[in-house]
Image (spheres, helix red, strand yellow):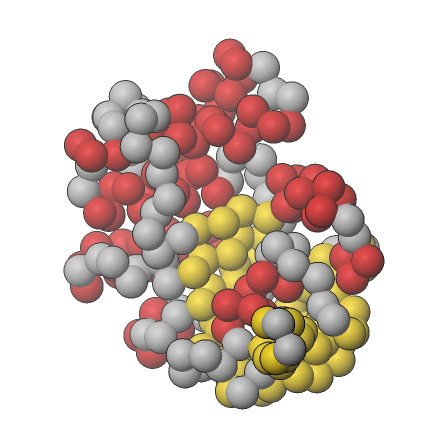
Amino acid sequence: MSIISLQDVRKEYRMGETSVEALSDADVEIEEGEFVAVMGPSGSGKSTLMNMIGALDVPTDGNVNIGADDISTFSEDQLAVLRSKKIGFIFQQFNLIPTMNATENVALPMLFTGVSKKDRRKRAEMLLEKVGLGDRLTHMPSELSGGQRQRVSIARSLANDPDIVLADEPTGNLDQETGEKIMDLLTDLNQEGKTIVMVTHDEEDASYADRIINIVDGKTGVRE
């Protein structure tokens, strides 16, 4: 059963009198529980594709389904609700709040879904334990290594127990050994049932995926 479906998706951006077509008739089907890598050269449309899958934007033409929801005509508020419930994000730059400790960073997404302060803290601590940071609960981002900050980012992505985890170059700022540990962690999450969609330039990282979606000039193709 498809958890993500893009059909004939085109995305055009207007800049004054100029228009740029970032996606052109893109078709993507991702099954529930898959681990998929998205690869392509710079400017190929990877970020735009991830924005569609992550409900961060809507297509100019075509349909995008996340689970049973066709988000093509969703309002900003509807997209925000869907993201908070169904999608977790992992970023290359970690995007942690520097004035919040690890527990507070992980708990932050739950603040917008009505979870009590006590339960937010309890779940955040549990998730940090899960990613091997049970001894870093009160550490600030500046007190953590790059790999530890990415683990906090992964824990934060799981805060609202999403069906889908989107990872944008998750090892891009890490050394090889640390990157391998992060990839092993993503594999574990996938084996637990999370659907993982990862943008990467790294063939070795992509080898962890079930299959690869190539994108060139806004058009998609699949490499098994």
Q: Tell me which corner region of the image, top left, top right, bottom left or bottom right, holds residue 6.
A: bottom right
Residue at figure coordinates x 72%, y 57% from the top left: 66
Q: Position of residue 209 (x, y in %)?
A: 45, 70
The relative height of residue 198 versus residue 78 in the rendered view (above or below) is: below
Task: Name the residue: 65% across, 21% down.
Answer: 114
**In terms of depth relative to the viewer, which is nearer, 187 or 6?**
6
Front residue of 16/97: it is 16
Task: Residue at the far front: name it.
Answer: 17
Q: Residue at x 49, y 49 (%)?
A: 89
Q: Residue furthest top?
A: 118
Q: Which residue is at the front of the view, 118 or 184? A: 118
Visible residue check, residue 78: yes
Quarter placement of the N terminus: bottom right
Quarter of the figure with residue 51: bottom right
Residue 111: % across, % down:
56, 24
Residue at 37 percent across and 63 percent down: it is 169
Q: Is residue 201 above or below residue 180?
A: below
Is residue 126 visible from the viewing direction of this image? no
